[in-house]
Image: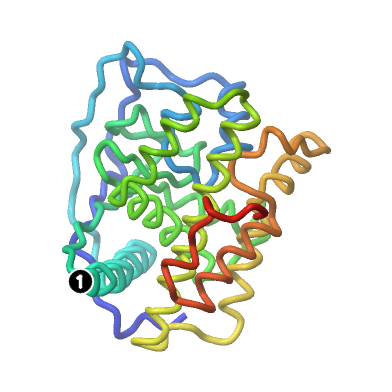
């Protein structure tokens, strides 16, 4: 992946090495973390699964510092975020709108968010309440070792997916899905709304890659395969089989490996946001 010509975003908060605090001083149990590991990788809102915001006073202040000039991974993240800003800025401008870019927070272990206590065990996530993407960079090592999904473009896909959730938040899609989930007749039906939301974020990640490559030729040989490997590795069926030996389709919240690859590739090949309407198709 070629990022030499990409600018670094100024919307990165570096909280690594800080004290980090969980809400109300309470930690998360091992059983909950196990659930999160299966259901929340590349998630949209940690409060949806952990329900951390009910009846608990939120602590959202945390120390932030500039990105070190000798930290290549942090610089990589800042450049990818900058690329997403340029892409979505142009897309919004073409529709006569201004793109309010999200912040991206680097943290270690845990950090306060407007959605609850962000934990490294949750994987990367987007909090719509404060419009920030959160990531503990140790997740990239886990992608390489546990999920066998290495590569810089796979890492960029992680960020682009979470930015996709920001786009959904700006468009009001996230609120509509949350309402639909609350009105669902069953948990399985509610989960289907979540699956469609996640697959749309995958498609938006593909749209970013299409536009970024068209502008600055960021893709190199093997990059698309890296993203596909990552998408396959974090499909609900793959994660559940790894965790418990079998898959339970009614409990899927993010989509199967095949579905995640399909929708990312659709965004990548078309570059068209309109192709990412996962809510109007009968079959995913």
> Which residue sits at x=16%, y=63%?
98
Left or right, 121 with respect to 114, comes to: right
Q: Residue furthest right?
A: 245
Q: Nearer the viewer, residue 278 or 155?
A: 278
Q: Is residue 164 above or below residue 7?
A: above
Residue 263 visible: yes
Residue 108, quarter of picture:
top left
Q: Is residue 196 above or below residue 274?
A: above
* Mark 1 neighbour density, 10 Å: few (under 14) some (14–19) many (20 or more): few
> So how many labels did they put on this image?
1
Left or right, 31 with respect to 6, comes to: right
Quadrant of the frame with the C terminus: bottom right
Residue 172: percent from left, percent from top: 32, 45
Left or right, 196 with respect to 210, comes to: right
Looking at the rendered structure, the secondary structure element under dot 1 is: helix
> Which residue sits at x=40%, y=87%?
214
Q: Which residue is mark 1?
A: 93
> Which residue sits at x=46%, y=64%?
205
Q: Is residue 174 above or below residue 263?
A: above
Residue 72: percent from left, percent from top: 36, 68
> Which residue sits at x=78%, y=42%?
241
Q: Nearer the viewer, residue 111 or 263?
A: 263
Q: Nearer the viewer, residue 237 or 270?
A: 270
Residue 70 visible: no
Residue 6: percent from left, percent from top: 29, 79
């Amino acid at each position: 992946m070629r990022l030499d010509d990409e600018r670094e975003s100024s919307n990165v908060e570096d909280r690594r090495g800080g004290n980090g605090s969980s809400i109300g001083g309470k930690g998360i149990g091992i059983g909950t973390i196990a659930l999160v590991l299966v259901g929340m990788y590349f998630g949209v809102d940690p409060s949806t699964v952990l329900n951390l915001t009910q009846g608990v006073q939120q602590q959202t202040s945390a120390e932030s510092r500039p990105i070190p000039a000798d930290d290549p991974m942090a610089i990589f993240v800042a450049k990818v975020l900058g690329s997403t800003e340029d892409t979505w800025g142009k897309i919004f401008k073409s529709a006569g709108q201004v793109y309010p870019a999200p912040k991206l927070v680097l943290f270690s272990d845990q950090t306060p968010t407007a959605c609850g206590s962000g934990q490294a065990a949750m994987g990367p996530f987007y909090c719509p309440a404060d419009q920030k993407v959160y990531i503990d960079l140790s997740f990239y090592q886990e992608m390489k070792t546990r999920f066998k999904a290495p590569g810089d473009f796979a890492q960029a896909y992680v960020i682009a997916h979470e930015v996709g959730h920001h786009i959904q938040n700006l468009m009001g899609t996230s609120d509509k899905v949350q309402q639909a989930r609350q009105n669902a007749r069953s948990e399985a039906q509610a989960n289907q709304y979540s699956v469609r939301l996640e697959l749309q974020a995958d498609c938006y990640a593909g749209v970013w890659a299409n536009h970024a490559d068209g502008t600055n030729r960021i893709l190199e040989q093997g990059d698309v395969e890296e993203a596909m490997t990552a998408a396959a590795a974090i499909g609900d069926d793959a994660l559940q089989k790894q965790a418990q030996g079998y898959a339970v389709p009614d409990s899927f919240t993010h989509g199967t490996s095949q579905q995640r690859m399909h929708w990312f590739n659709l965004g990548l090949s078309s570059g068209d946001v309109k192709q990412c309407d996962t809510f109007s198709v009968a079959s995913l």
